[in-house]
Image (cartoon, coloured by chain):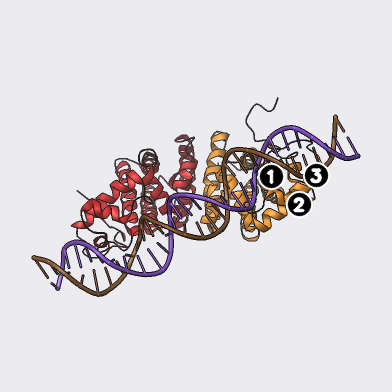
Chain colours: A red, B orange, C brown, D purple
DNA sequence: ATAGTGACCATATGCTAATTCGGTCACTCG
DNA sequence: CGAGTGACCGAATTAGCATATGGTCACTAT
């Protein structure tokens, strides 16, 4: 039951048939290996052996090892994002959606940090190196944020004077300490109170 | 005994007479060498040679090479902070003080980044490794922020309901993208508009 | 007692050679 | 023609070692 709504350039770095024959096997093997041994310590020969084919065959499906890393990273980020979307979905007000959306992002990110440290490192690397997977993720977060704010403006919860783009980009920046993997790790102590405080500050700013 | 709360001591890592001509010579030499060759590429033997004494003598004044690095770092951060304090001083309203204080911090930080890249790297390292020099700097920034907010509350510019500590720590976090050296470098594009947007957001939040 | 140091040690750093690894291509096989 | 691969190449990584470096201490000279 994969949601195939608006996959934004998730296929960057892909080659050959987009359909899921061998490609999914590669991704599964990469997920397992990157999670157990780390991105740097697994070779594409390892992945090839895991799926029972030769190394060269991997490159019929992916441009590079980094492309595989991006796919895994995108998968992790997708899990975080979909959990956040789900959490925000069953909130009544825009305010509550806002709170749940961002606190779920942070919650799931810290879960990844503690439970899948090596995958977290991959995501952190993706963020600092501005890989497409991370950029796409941030773009989708901002898009969701925009929808929540628009909703809040319609329902009268939020003020309407400030240009929407300005509000969105400012919030994205202010929330960076809890979204950017490197900063999140840095700000672990004090969670979740610290995040609640920033969210409160932002919501006060959004008040009409 | 020392202070009961763990405020980082500016003289941490110092040895021997606190006020000594040789200490200042060491700091001057370190400032020059770290700025020209970088912290990693200058040896304490280099500093010793620069001031005309033996390497061992350096250790009569500093615990370690890192302690010297912290002193230089503290000096850089002090320059930034004092410029920001000066800029905020001749502002009439708390709102204006807030704007000038933080935009000067960012301005001076980026100046350091472009003009003294090697010293900036030292400061960045200090921040990520949470050296006392960086912690003390952040503590002083937050202290100044608290004073500005208190002023604004007295003059009626800012709201008074939210607990002061909560407001301060939330603002410190929200401004991290423009204060933390690693994030600042990451967010260089879009400055200064991006910062203005976040400052606007925060000021809207502070409105009564 | 104070100012200052050479000799010394353990660890970190730089360097070179050997190996591994990412990536490609001509090629086979069915 | 398409699925699949062994052999190959240059760049990157590792291993091992020589050297440099951070840091200490007993010591001298004043």
Label 1: how many residues lie within 10 Å, few (<14), some (14-19) or many (20+)? Answer: many
Does the residue at mark 3 contact the one at mark 2 (Cβ under 8 Å)?
no
Q: Chain of mark 3?
A: B
Position in image of residue B56 (x %, y %):
74, 42
The percent coordinates of residue A164 (x first, y second) are: 43, 55
Examine the rendering and report whether any part of residue B190 can be seen: no
Q: Which residue is mark 1?
A: B68
- Percent from the top left, x then y, of residue B52? 80, 50
Residue located 30% across and 58% down the image: A10
Q: CA distance from mark 3 to mark 2?
A: 13 Å
Residue carrying label 2: B49
Report if residue A201 is visible in the image.
yes
Which SS class for mark 1?
A: helix
Which of the two discs, 3 and 2, labels the residue nearer the N terminus? 3
Q: Residues within 10 Å of mark 3 (few under 14, many from 20)?
A: some
On the image, numbered disc 3 is attached to which residue? B22
Q: Nearer the viewer, mark 2 or mark 1?
A: 2
Tags 3 and 1 on a common chain = yes
User: The residue marked by circle 1 belongs to what chain?
Assistant: B
Nearer to the camera, B73 or A208: B73
């Amino acid at each position: 039951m994969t949601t195939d709504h608006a996959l934004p350039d998730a296929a960057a770095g892909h080659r050959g048939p987009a359909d899921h024959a061998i490609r999914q096997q590669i991704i599964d093997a990469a997920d397992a290996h990157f999670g157990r041994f780390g991105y740097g310590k697994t070779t594409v020969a390892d992945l090839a052996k895991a799926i029972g084919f030769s190394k060269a065959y991997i490159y019929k499906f992916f441009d590079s090892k980094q492309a595989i890393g991006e796919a895994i990273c995108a998968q992790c980020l997708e899990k975080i994002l979909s959990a956040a979307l789900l959490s925000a979905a069953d909130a009544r007000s825009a305010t509550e959606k806002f709170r749940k959306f961002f606190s779920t992002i942070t919650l799931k990110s810290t879960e990844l940090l503690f439970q899948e440290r090596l995958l977290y490192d991959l995501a952190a690397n993706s963020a600092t190196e501005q890989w497409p997977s991370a950029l796409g993720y941030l773009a989708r977060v901002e898009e969701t944020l925009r929808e929540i704010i628009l909703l809040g403006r319609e329902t009268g919860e939020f003020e309407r004077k400030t240009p929407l783009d300005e509000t969105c980009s400012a919030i994205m920046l202010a929330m960076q300490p809890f979204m950017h993997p490197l900063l999140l790790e840095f700000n672990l102590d004090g969670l979740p109170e610290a995040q609640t405080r920033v969210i409160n500050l932002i919501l006060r700013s959004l008040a009409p």
